[in-house]
Image (cartoon, rainbow, N blue to C red):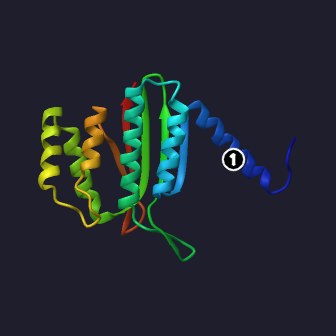
Amino acid sequence: MSYSGESKGFINYIYERYKNLNIKDIILVFEGQITHQVMKALTSLVEEQLDDVENDKVLRRVYHVMVESLRNINRHAEAYEYRGHPYPGMGLVLVAKNHERFQVTTGNIIENNHVEDLSMFLGKLNNIDSDSLDDLYKKQMREGILSPEGGAGLGFIDIKRKTGNPLDYSFVRIDEETSFFIFTSTISR
């Protein structure tokens, strides 16, 4: 079956993206508003796909990292406005796998005034050993300074503790006020 007309270019575009996703072993891609219901659905989808493939320890880590990463978007993503309608908690999540690891990548819009502090905090997490990471986690639990959105960085600390791998992050400047924050966690298999 073939299609003609204006939709043919779009259909070819979708098919090319589909082929690329299969080549890279991407098992989930979602872009949109991250609500509690969406978080439950996405984690359930990944859990179903991995249930018969992975051991329970790896599955729990992937699930945990997904939940923490999605919560980060839900709580801290800046509102996105489209055609005059605000969409809070808009973001992107991508889960990929290969023979050695899983990667959970999220992206969301943040205000530029948060970029430097967030970058320094994530850099600090990447440069401390596991004992210091545990101490930092306990300290944040006891006396962590909460951001206006209610976070103390515990999700990032916990992801680093659970994965034991460096946190990968970058910021793409959108305009004078906002940037796109890309965060990737790696879970070894």
* Count of all numbered marks drawn on residues in the image: 1
**Residue 173 place in picture, x, y as percent:** 39, 59
Which residue was labeled with disc 1?
13
Q: Left or right of 95: which side holds 144?
A: left
**Residue 175 place in picture, x, y as percent:** 41, 66
Q: Please, is residue 62 above or below residue 71 in the view?
A: above
Q: Please, is residue 27 above or below residue 112 in the view?
A: above
Q: Residues within 10 Å of mark 1 (few under 14, many from 20)?
A: few
Q: Residue at x 25, y 36 (%)?
A: 161
Q: Residue at x 86, y 43 (%)?
A: 2
**Residue 159 place in picture, x, y as percent:** 30, 41
* Quadrant (top left/top right/bottom left/bottom right) for the C terminus: top left
The quarter holding residue 125 reads: top left
Q: Please, is residue 130 above or below residue 172 in the view?
A: above
Question: In terms of secondary structure, where does tag 1 sit?
Answer: helix
Residue 30 versus residue 68: which sits nearer the camera? Answer: 68
Residue 155 versus residue 9: which sits nearer the camera? Answer: 155
Looking at the image, can residue 152 be seen? yes
